[in-house]
């Protein structure tokens, strides 16, 4: 009888430790863990990304929060990564970039938006 009681206690300890480990990794996953957040703006009538030179660490997911302060649509395009996301006016758009190797990844406006469209460019510098 005492033997089965100790087995039950050991089983409970194993379950509790398992739940704690799952909670730890689950929290890391839900909270983003290895994700780096970056903020970018398109200021009204400037046809520029601000900043237009974004320096980020290698091998981490990058989450870019783009605030389009213009009254018209722009688009965030990174050809090398196959990313093209519309950024509606007066809204935040969140774009997630996959972990990248060190290097430079040019981006541009992917929506014909007005007189400065052709020069609305920038680069992500991965270090
Ligand atoms: Cu444009």
Image (spheres, grey):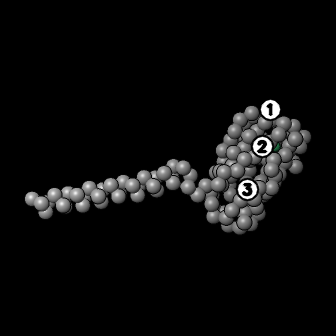
Label 2 CA crowd tier, 10 Å (few <14, some 14–19, many 20+): some
Q: How far from the left and from the top, in percent, is residue 5?
A: 16, 58
Classify mark 3: residues with Cα within 10 Å, few (<14), some (14-19) or many (20+).
Answer: few
Closer to the N terminus: mark 3 or mark 1?
1
Which residue is label 3 attached to?
A: 79
State the residue lying farthest toward the front: 2
Q: Residue at x 81, y 47 (%)?
A: 50
Is residue 73 in view from this perspective? no
Instruction: Determine crowd level at label 1: few under 14, some 14-19, many 20+ residues with C-alpha closer than 10 A.
Output: few
Residue under pointer 2: 41
Q: Residue at x 77, y 55 (%)?
A: 54
Q: Position of residue 36 (x, y in %)?
A: 65, 54
Q: Please identify the quadrant where the C terminus is shown.
A: bottom right
Report how far apart the C-alphas of labels 2 and 3 lie in the structure: 20 Å
Ligand 1 is within 8 Å of the C-beta of the residue at disc 1: no
Instruction: Kindly indicate whether the residue at mark 2 contacts the one at mark 1 (C-beta within 8 angstroms).
Output: no
Task: Return the disc, 1 or 2, that comes first in the chain's sequence.
Answer: 2
Quarter of the rendered structure image containing ligand 1: top right
Q: Give the secondary structure at mark 3.
A: helix
Residue 56 disc label: none
Left or right, 74 with respect to 22, comes to: right
Instruction: Give the CA separation, mark 1 to mark 2.
Output: 13 Å
- Numbered disc in front, either 2 or 3: 2
* Left or right of 86, for residue 10: left
Question: Which is more foreground, mark 3 or mark 1?
Answer: 1
Q: Which residue is mark 1?
A: 71
Q: Position of residue 59 (x, y in %)?
A: 63, 64
Residue that appears at 80% across and 55% down: 53
For the residue labelled by badge 2, is the local secondary structure a helix, a strand or a loop? strand
């Amino acid at each position: 009888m005492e033997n089965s009681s100790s087995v039950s206690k050991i089983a409970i300890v194993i379950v509790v430790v398992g739940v704690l480990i799952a909670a730890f990794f689950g929290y890391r996953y839900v909270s983003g863990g290895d994700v780096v957040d970056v903020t970018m703006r398109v200021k009204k009538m400037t046809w520029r990304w601000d900043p237009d030179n974004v320096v980020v660490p290698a091998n981490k997911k990058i989450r870019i929060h783009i605030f389009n302060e213009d009254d018209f649509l722009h688009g965030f395009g990174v050809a090398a990564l196959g990313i093209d996301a519309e950024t509606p006016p007066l809204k935040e758009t969140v774009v997630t970039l996959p972990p990248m190797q060190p290097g430079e990844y040019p981006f541009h406006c992917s929506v014909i938006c007005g007189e400065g469209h052709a020069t609305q460019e920038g680069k992500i510098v991965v270090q």
